[in-house]
Image (cartoon, rainbow, N blue to C red):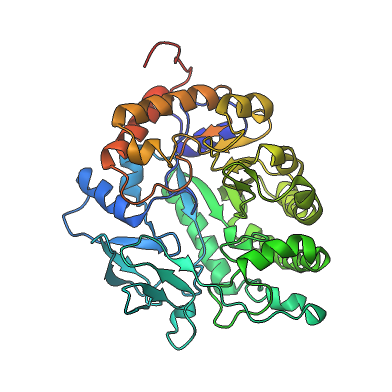
Amino acid sequence: MMSSRERVRLALEHREADRVPLDLGGTTVSGMHVDTVYRLRQALDLDAPGTAVKIIEPFQMLGEIQPDLQDALGIDAAILSGTGTAFGFKLEGWKEWRTFGGTPALVPAGFNTQAEPSGDLLLYPEGDRTAPPSGRMPRGGFYFDIIVRQEPLDDKNLCVEDNLEEFRPISDQELEHYRRGAEELYTQTDKAIVLNLGALALGNIARVPGPGLKYPKGIRDVEEWYISLTARRDHVFKIFERQTEINLANLQKIGAAVGNRVTAAYLSGADFGAQNGPFVSPQTYRHLFLPFHKQINDWVHRHTTWKTLIHSCGSVWALLEDFIAAGFDILNPVQCSAANMNPQDLKKKFGDRITYWGGGVDTQSTLPFGSPQEVRREVRERIKAFGPRGGFVFNAVHNVQALVPVENVLAMYQAAREYGSYPLRLDAAA
């Protein structure tokens, strides 16, 4: 049998391995809600009842995918992330907490919430409850919504530096964390290591409001930001220029720390697609984003063996040529339910030039609401579409959400292992 690392590498080189590689939790956009992680671990008898699960990403409330769960499902990718969170506190000093769904969890020390009279939970930047809250989880909800804290804008006195506060030189301590993490994953596992640098993304709308900043300045309102892509295009261009300078300097240091132990790097989490089409036009992408994405991808490809990943939900058919021109090797999450995202067409048109990481089953309908047999059938169809000639890493479309039946999760990975062996033999009826 191949190692996981070899299996993923061949897929990224558009070659067939022994089977289609599988992912769960290799990135912060291919993980699983903590409630579902807990129920899955219980169903697989990996924990005693009541054993808490770490929340490693509090914005999306993602649960930790530990090695025993990876092994139980046959997962081939492992995440290498930094020490921080979107809300500005570090992943350290773990303490007990419970979700609205009753899941016992462990959260970082900076995960300090306060309940409003409505029952909503507020979360604070850097864990500082004296600062204005930057996140809100509705009562009975599953995730934190970012609270926009936009100061009045003065178009005559816009300052590029105001949108640079979260883009800062990487510390020696953070570099040591990456170096040590890459070394441990490389020597102690056979997994493909995915370096998660989504926080470096230009225009990642989850980060634009500055949820980790106590008093964010600049353009921080979501609607105002998208208006600015047209109305203040020259100003946004200057912001991206400066952010890219900082990112490249940090990438050089991270690259020296982790070397070629890393298989792939998640570099952009800025969504460009909606359900029915792109909400950033190809012209806007080409003018504002492509030049800087290309700078970063060119550096990676000149100095490392990493493959680079862009995350964008929605209908991005009209942007895929530009993503490829920018140098991205991998598209995630491959939202096949969106307009113009037919799996067979995607594979035929772009499948020899970009790897599809995700798209294995629909998370809007089939996975949460279908039967296990319907999940199996869709998994088989997606492997038949995306699997030939490599270029496919199996994962659901984006993170597996809360309330998804565990039976469906198990059916998804069982089917992926069953139908994903090369040479693919999928012509017979399921």
Q: Is residue 58 above or below residue 395?
A: below
The picture places residue 128, in percent across and down from the top left corner, at 45, 84
Q: Is residue 341 above or below residue 202?
A: above
Q: Is residue 135 above or below residue 75?
A: below
Q: Residue furthest bottom?
A: 130
Q: Is residue 124 above or below residue 329?
A: below
Of residues 318 and 172, which is closer to you in this image?
A: 318
Q: Who's the residue at 54% across and 61% down the image? A: 179
Whether residue 246 is visible, yes or no, is yes
Q: Who's the residue at 60% across and 41% down the image? A: 276
Q: Residue furthest top?
A: 428
Q: Please give left or right for residue 163 compared with residue 9 in the image.
A: right
Of residues 275 and 4, which is closer to you in this image?
A: 275
Which quarter of the figure has residue 227?
A: bottom right
Q: Please give left or right for residue 361 compared with residue 263 in the image.
A: left
The picture places residue 51, in percent across and down from the top left corner, at 21, 59
